[in-house]
Amino acid sequence: MLSNRPYLIRALFEWILDNGMTPHLLVDAMHPGADVPRKFVEEGRIVLNIAPTAVKDLLISNEMITFSARFGGVPSAVALPPSAVLGIYARENGHGMIFPQEDELESRASGDQEGASVGGQGGRDTKDEKKSKRPALRVVK
């Protein structure tokens, strides 16, 4: 299946805008294919304001996110694969989503496929083992 990340990015982008807030992307600047202004990278990450008033020609496709923006007054083109996006959130209140790393997702998917092909061999132990590796949701107040 295709990655759901670009679809979620587009949906959350629209949701943040519909609520009158400013969408920001948290990006892994060291990700292969991420073309971002290196001068503004901190600890291998960069936060990008992708509000329509801050960028020009924003395109969020399944393969690439592209736009042009000014960084320190200098116009720059930005291009990055959706897999480089670590999260999208509203600047005003921090609501949004942080994504798991792609390699984490791939290992889970391959682990699920291996478990399915094994069938009944050690079924109970495999289920219990999978449950313990899954992330848990919790309410933070």
Image (tube, rainbow, N blue to C red):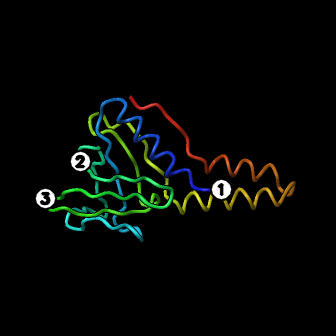
Occupied quadrant, residue 72? bottom left
Residue picked out by circle 3: 72
Which residue is pictured at 87% across the width and 54% down the height?
120
Which residue is pictured at 39% across the width and 53% down the height?
59
Dot 1 lies on which element?
loop
Q: CA distance from mark 3 to mark 2?
A: 12 Å
Which is more toward the observer, 3 or 122? 3
Q: Nearer the viewer, mark 3 or mark 2?
A: 2
Crowd around label 2: few <14 · some 14–19 · many ≥20 (10 Å): some
Q: CA distance from mark 3 to mark 1?
A: 40 Å
Position of 15 relative to 54 (above/below)? above
**Please, which residue is most extreme toward the bottom here?**
32
Residue picked out by circle 1: 1
Which residue is pictured at 41% across the width and 56% down the height?
85
Q: CA distance from mark 2 to mark 1?
A: 33 Å
Position in image of residue 109 (x %, y %): 65, 57
Residue picked out by circle 2: 54
Whether residue 113 sits left or right of residue 50 in the image: it is right
Question: Quarter of the image containing the C terminus?
Answer: top left
Position in image of residue 107 (x %, y %): 61, 62
**Please, which residue is most extreme toward the right here?**
120
Which is more toward the observer, 125 or 25? 25
Q: As shown in the figure, which amino acid type bears the numbered disc 1?
A: Met
Dot 3 lies on which element?
loop
